[in-house]
Amino acid sequence: MDVVRALGNESLLSNSSGPAAWDPFRRPLDSIQPWHFRLVAAVMFVVTSVSLAENLAVILVTAKFKQLRQPVNYVIVNLSVADFLVSLTGGTISFLANLKGYFYMGHWACVLEGFAVTFFGIVSLWSLALLAFERYVVICRPLGNTRLRGKHAAQGIAFVWTFSFIWTIPPTMGWSSYTTSKIGTTCEPNWYSGAHNDRSYIIAFFTTCFIVPLLVILVSYGKLLHKLTKVSDTQGRLRTARKPERQVTRMVVVMIIAFLICWMPYATFSILATAYPSVELDPHLAAVPAFFSKTATVYNPVIYVFMNKQFRKCLMQMSRCGAIATVGSNVKPASVRAVLTQDKRGSQLSIMAEGDMIINAVWQRVSSLPIMLKVSLGLLRSLS
């Protein structure tokens, strides 16, 4: 296949377009101190670990509890799958590259990381847009009494993955390329080339994969808030509507702000680098937006899932069950013994289990683990 052959083709990596004279596949950039790379590696390790644990918890909890298997949660799980894969590929490769200070894994790994991070990242962005549109349809009912079902969510998810693949595969087939960043420890679309082939792709990619989903989110949530305000005013139920409206408003604001904080710096940097390819960029400054956008995989589960009371309840239930099962399997039979006691009349017997011992053992084991690691281990054990 052309894609497989492209992985070993150095022409996919347009390093000559940048001002750097060093080879990012052979040695670190001289202008950056080694401890800078180690610091970035440490940050990427933390972000990747937390993201993998959080998104794995989302996936496993939704699979375990039937009450969570609703159309909106299908989209949330799809978002978590994409974020999980972004961390698994981009986070891991970036961590390893920063440990060395350069992209020692070679050209094929650069193309793989560039494609995977871009592909799964766009799936995440469009999943947010799909989630916003789903909430708009459910609350504002522009389609009348038509209800969104599982098949509609599946169709939307299929569109997201297909659309994202269409716009991220071209650089592996000749329309632009995936190249190393200015810092040399991560790979991305070639923002720095002034060639028409690269500029045309970046403009099309930026429009379809950032501007359009952002507009979908803003328009959907704008109409949603307008609908809630209108219902509150016309029905005269301000006292009952004010609290839900306030909650939805807070959720919407957090969603939009997180989206903009994570992706706007990287999107702005990429379009400026494309518009002014001759401008010399400091490697430190150029690396910040790319690494910062990877933190979105940590925020998404918190905002979209852990603020949901139903999911939080299921998560804690699963966590407790998993922790008890883990500790229970390690408790010796003698630790849980029945104690026969006779009451004052001597006519009845009661059985007393040493429950305090079990509770203390569970608490000591569970409290010593990081919260998300505890959750993930408990979920895996419960599902086994």
Image: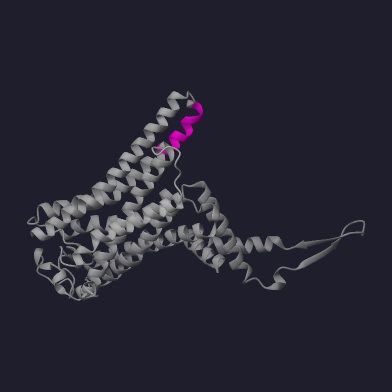
Most prominent secondary structure in the magenta stretch? helix
The answer, for residue 193, to whether it is visible in the render is: no
* Residue at position x 46%, y 44% in the image: 147
Q: Which residue is at the front of the view, 150 or 201?
A: 150
Can residue 245 be found in the magenta stretch?
yes
Relative to 48, is 150 above or below? above
Q: Position of residue 220 (x, y in %)?
A: 34, 40
In the rendered view, tell whether residue 244 sits above or below residue 109.
above
The verdict on residue 67 being magenta is no
Say left or right for 42 vs 61.
left
Magenta span: 239-249
Regarding residue 126, the answer to whether it shows in the image is: yes
Q: Who is closer to the viewer here, 162 or 360?
A: 162
Q: Nearer the viewer, residue 3 or 297?
A: 3
Residue 83: image x %, image y %? 36, 59
Q: Is residue 154 left or right of residue 357?
A: left
Residue drawn at point x = 35 percent, y = 52 percent: 127
Assign the N terminus to one quadrant of the image.
bottom left
Give the position of the C terminus as an image quadrant. bottom right
Residue 370: x %, y % from top left: 48, 61
